[in-house]
Amino acid sequence: MRKIFQMNPFCWLPPLLLAYIMCVSIGQAAAAGPDTNPAVSLRAKYAELGPQLSDNQFKRPLHLDSAESPTQLKGDIYALVDYPFAAVKQALSEPTHWCELLILHLNIKYCRASAGTAGSMLAVSIGTKHHQPLAQAFGVEFAFNPAATTPEYFDLRLNAKKGPLGTSDYRIRLEAATVQSGKTFLHLTYSYSYNFAGRAAMQAYLATIGSDKVGFTITGKQTAGQPDHIGGVRGVVERNTMRYYLAIDAYLGGLSTPPAQQLEKRLESWFASTEHYPRQLHEVDRAAYLDMKRREYLRQQQSR
């Protein structure tokens, strides 16, 4: 009997009480699992979005959400990419690599990574869709924070307190987890807050040069059967979230080419990807984009 007690300290409990404890413990473990293990949570989202990833307007395994509140805009992209997790983690864990990918975005004019006592920072200049002097662009300081990293998951966050035109609290967050077949599941979040001046500037933009622009969320159908897409401020955040995602994808796609050819590969890839969605993302022609980005990249390299 003593040996039995030593092997199983719960054997003295009444059977019904033991069954209750076991059920409660199992239920608590199941409830706590996804919350305490972000890799499990992200894979659960991947399973949940299976139908949307396999059949959508993007013609690639991608799902986009957006949200608007009185003071904040947020876009989320979930995407399956055909790159091994280890390669994705290595490529996107370095601040200097983020400068290489951010410069692909139409409105990013410059990026420089630095390290200090407070951690890594990215000095980013945001401007127009055309080439311009850096003095005319708006400087944004992003704190580069690798929030979590394991052999099967990483969580990276870029935060900036101030942005242009009355905006603030910029956040870019990228999560990634391993999934089957050697692929990687990504979750990109892009969000920012705005005050009264920021909302006024946004409304002025939407009433003028941005009046005909739309996002990706389908809100209905036109009489001819064509989809209606969301406009307004949610359209704005959806377009920018997609541009950042396509920059990440283009950067990863360039890793397989020789270093001397990677920039051209990424520029061509980013522009070609945006042209798949001309209703939302077309701004300039290919020659203008390539010329502008080559000049901006050269300026970025020379300032290091």
Image (spheres, grey):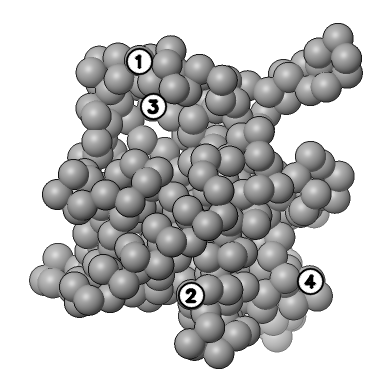
Marks 2 and 1 close (CB-CB < 8 Å)? no
Is 201 left, or right, of 261 in this rendering? left
Could you tell me if residue 211 is visible in this image? yes
Number of the front mark, 3 or 2: 2
Which residue does the numbered mark 4 point to in the structure image?
A: 180
Residue marked by disc 3: 72
- The kind of residue on which mark 4 rests is Gln
Query: In the rendered structure, which disc, 3 or 2, sits on the residue that comes first in sequence?
Result: 3
Q: Quick check: marks 1 and 3 in contact, CB under 8 Å? A: no
Decide which of tag 1 and tag 3 comes sooner along the chain.
3
Q: What label sits on residue 263 in the rendered view? A: 2
Q: Secondary structure at mark 2?
A: helix
Checking the image for residue 214, the label placed there is none
Identified at 42% across, 16% down, the residue is 208
* Residue 102, horizontal then vertical, whole percent: 41, 60
Residue type, mark 3 in image: Gln
Residue 38 in view: no
Give the quadrant of the C terminus.
Answer: bottom left
In this view, the residue farthest toward the left is: 117
Count neighbours of disc 3 (C-alpha within 10 A) and say few if under 14, some if 14 to 19, many if 20 or more.
Answer: some
Which of the 4 image quarters holds residue 58?
top right
Determine the residue positioned at 67% across, 28% down: 217
Vertical position of residue 143 compared to residue 115: above or below? above
Q: CA distance from mark 4 to mark 2?
A: 30 Å
